[in-house]
Image: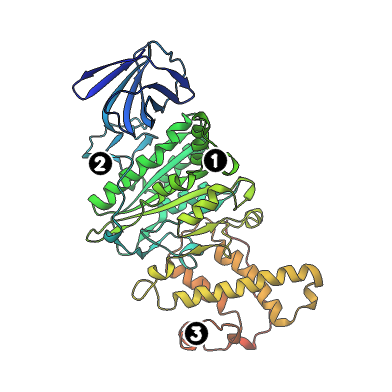
Amino acid sequence: MTHSVRTLSVRRVRGVDRLAGPLLVLHRVPDVALGEEVIVRGRDGSPRHGQVLELDAETVVVQVYEGTSALDLESTAVELTGGPFRLGVSTEMLGRVLDGRGRPIDGGAPIVPLSSADVNGQAINPTARANPDDFIETGISAIDLLNSLVRGQKLPIFTGAGLPADEVAARIATGARVLGEERFVTVFAAMGITRRVADFFREAFASSGSLDRVTLFLNLADDPAVERLLTPRCALTLAEHLAFDLGMQTLVVMTDVTAYGEALRELSTAREEVPGRRGYPGYLYTDLATLFERAGRIHGRPGSLTILPIVTMPDDDITHPIPDLTGYITEGQIVLSRELHGRGIFPPIDALPCLSRLMNAGIGEGRTRPEHRAVADQLYALYARGRELRRLVTVIGEAALSLAEQRVLAFADAFEARFIGQGAARRTLDESFAVAWQLLGEMPRDELTRIPSDVLDRHLPAAAPEASTGPIRVAEPAR
């Protein structure tokens, strides 16, 4: 039998009914709230943290972040704090490495919070939302010129096992900036990663010289899986403080959302819920939406919150529930290619299936260049034709192609090697345009049907390239 004792706002319950993995079940006591923070103590008195996950007429189900191992039914005490889990937030968290619950693990001084906030956040009133706009320069040509990221957007990166998604994520986290805006910061939420990958991110941020504007939340593979459900919420809570309270342009990079989904499935199994697709809970879509929909801008506030989730597709299957539902919630996708990676091209971004639904809002009048959309469309058109010709060549051979078709086929190779394959270099948007115009300038003018003639006259040499019959030069991919 459980009994409760009220001391100020904290109620203590001695003894529990059942322990199951990360879950603890006890008899319901009055005035318990869903999502309420709890502190669980075993025989040794050391605290474990959790929250109320489920309520019914008779019982309370508590999710314990550190798990329930070494606890027993009789001696376990549960303290109900009377409020939700809150995170102390401050600009002192910039430049720091924190665990999945926001506690410093870098050996630095304790963080003095400026305020505390509910990690579950608050929904932005739709009438208060401002349209996402203003171009974010990531330093990666295949994103900046072809699939532009804008302030307030949520744009995932779909990857596969063994592909360099971590390197791409680190490159974006350290190199992204809003043109003309100095107050740009990155909050990085790493979920279920190995210590080797954690060390990679620490070194990448330190060596880039941008560590003072990056906060790193680390949930390691050997940390409690259930803590992964809290890690992105803590990261987003800090990001909301920086963006909406302090007016900063904030980018949140989450890796890996698939590890988050696996933790959610593990918890659902422990709760003995009826599984949905592939064993994932039926509320997977809703749960992911509570994370991604925290991105945006608010009328009258200068800051913005942009989310870039990294999603590993099991077996490279883009129809898997996690990437599939992520694609429904977010505004486009960046897809990494195993073929390009195998050929040594970095970043191995497969341009054709990529999409940024808010690109036009970010490259509009006065934001980047007037010809941005036209150049992107022309590159896409030529590259798509080149990819189709590659498949045709496997059937009829390259010798059967016309000279014009051979030039388009060569363009596709040059586009991958020289435009997508930028290697370790960070390119400004102007540099990305320079490479694009160099490639387009090697094609006959009558092939450039997506770009107005006056724009071609301004950017291409006066000598008409249609007289050239030589092949396009294809350089080695940058490394």
Q: Position of residue 256 (x, y in %)?
A: 50, 43
- Going from N to C along the chain, the mark reached first, 1 or 2, is 2
What is the three-letter code of the residue carrying label 3? Answer: Leu
Give the mark toward the camera: 1 or 2. 1
Q: Position of residue 435 (x, y in %)?
A: 52, 71
- Going from N to C along the chain, the mark reached first, 2 or 3, is 2
- Regarding residue 341, the answer to whether it shows in the image is yes
Q: Which residue is mark 3?
A: 456
Closest to the observer: 56 or 35?
Answer: 56
What is the three-letter code of the residue carrying label 1? Answer: Tyr
Q: Which residue is mark 1?
A: 280
Q: Position of residue 303 (x, y in %)?
A: 27, 56
Closest to the observer: 408 or 430?
Answer: 408
- Going from N to C along the chain, the mark reached first, 1 or 3, is 1
Quarter of the figure with residue 247: bottom left
Q: Secondary structure at mark 1?
A: loop
Left or right: 140, with 241 as reference point: right
Q: Secondary structure at mark 3?
A: helix
